[in-house]
Image (cartoon, rainbow, N blue to C red):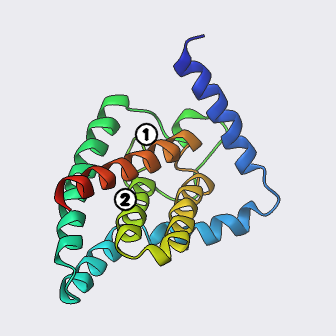
């Protein structure tokens, strides 16, 4: 077996472990609300709020960083074309309808970690809360059945890397 097959086998096994949790129905319900916070609307609202509060540099980092993150995200998504769990597994249906066809990487997780990283740079006293939220966005995407675990791990790395790069360039 090659490395991608090994990763996929581990991913499927881990995914089924998540799906077998005792309180999965409750976690899925909570996951809908958490996932909604990472749909993007709140990011735009936060950027407008930060602009009016005088954080122009932060807003610039957010704008250009999200542009970079979305470009890399779409290149990876279209390049790997990894099927979502409902399409890859015969005996599974997701709990929500995903916004696009492919699974890798998780855009919600990427965006959440991007925001957590950027906002932690400006507001370090909130970093535990921000990363707690971002991690739960990633978990929610698994519990909703639209991503495998590695999709969210790579999403977290992608968002964090784009934030670190943009802060390094612009600040």
Residue density around tag 1, few if under 14, some if 14–19, many if 20 or more, within 10 Å? many
The residue labelled by disc 1 is 104
Residue at the image position 19 percent from the left and 53 percent from the top:
169
In primary-sequence order, the first of circles 2 and 1 is 1
142 to 105, vertically: above or below = below
Q: Judge left or right: residue 9 versus residue 48.
A: right
Q: Among all residues in the image, which is located at the extreme top?
A: 1
Secondary element under disc 2, as helix, strand or loop, is helix
Q: Please tell me in which quadrant of the rendered image residue 16 appears.
A: top right
> 5 and 90: which one is in front?
5
- The percent position of residue 53, horizontal first and vertical second, equals 23, 89
Residue at the image position 31 percent from the left and 30 percent from the top:
79
The residue labelled by disc 2 is 114
Residue at the image position 33 percent from the left and 68 percent from the top:
40
Q: Please tell me in which quadrant of the rendered image residue 11 appears.
A: top right
61 to 71, vertically: above or below = below
Residue density around tag 2, few if under 14, some if 14–19, many if 20 or more, within 10 Å? many
168 to 88, vertically: above or below = below
- The percent position of residue 51, horizontal first and vertical second, equals 19, 82
- The percent position of residue 146, horizontal first and vertical second, equals 52, 50
38 to 69, vertically: above or below = below
Are circles 2 and 1 on residues that touch, CB within 8 Å?
A: no
């Amino acid at each position: 077996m090659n490395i991608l097959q090994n990763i996929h086998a581990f991913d499927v096994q881990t995914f089924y472990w998540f799906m077998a949790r005792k309180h999965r129905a409750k976690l899925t319900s909570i996951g809908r609300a958490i996932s909604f916070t990472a749909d993007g609307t709140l990011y735009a609202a936060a950027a407008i709020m930060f602009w009016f509060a005088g954080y122009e540099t932060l807003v610039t980092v957010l704008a250009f960083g999200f542009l970079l993150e979305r470009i890399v995200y779409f290149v990876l998504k279209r390049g790997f074309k990894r099927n979502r769990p409902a399409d890859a597994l015969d005996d599974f249906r997701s709990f929500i309808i995903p916004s696009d066809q492919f699974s890798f990487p998780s855009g919600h997780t990427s965006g959440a970690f991007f925001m957590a990283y950027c906002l932690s740079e400006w507001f370090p006293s909130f970093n535990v809360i921000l990363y707690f939220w971002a991690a739960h966005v990633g978990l929610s995407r698994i519990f909703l059945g639209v991503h495998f675990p590695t999709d969210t791990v790579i999403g977290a790395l992608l968002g964090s890397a784009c934030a670190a790069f943009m802060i390094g360039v612009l600040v």
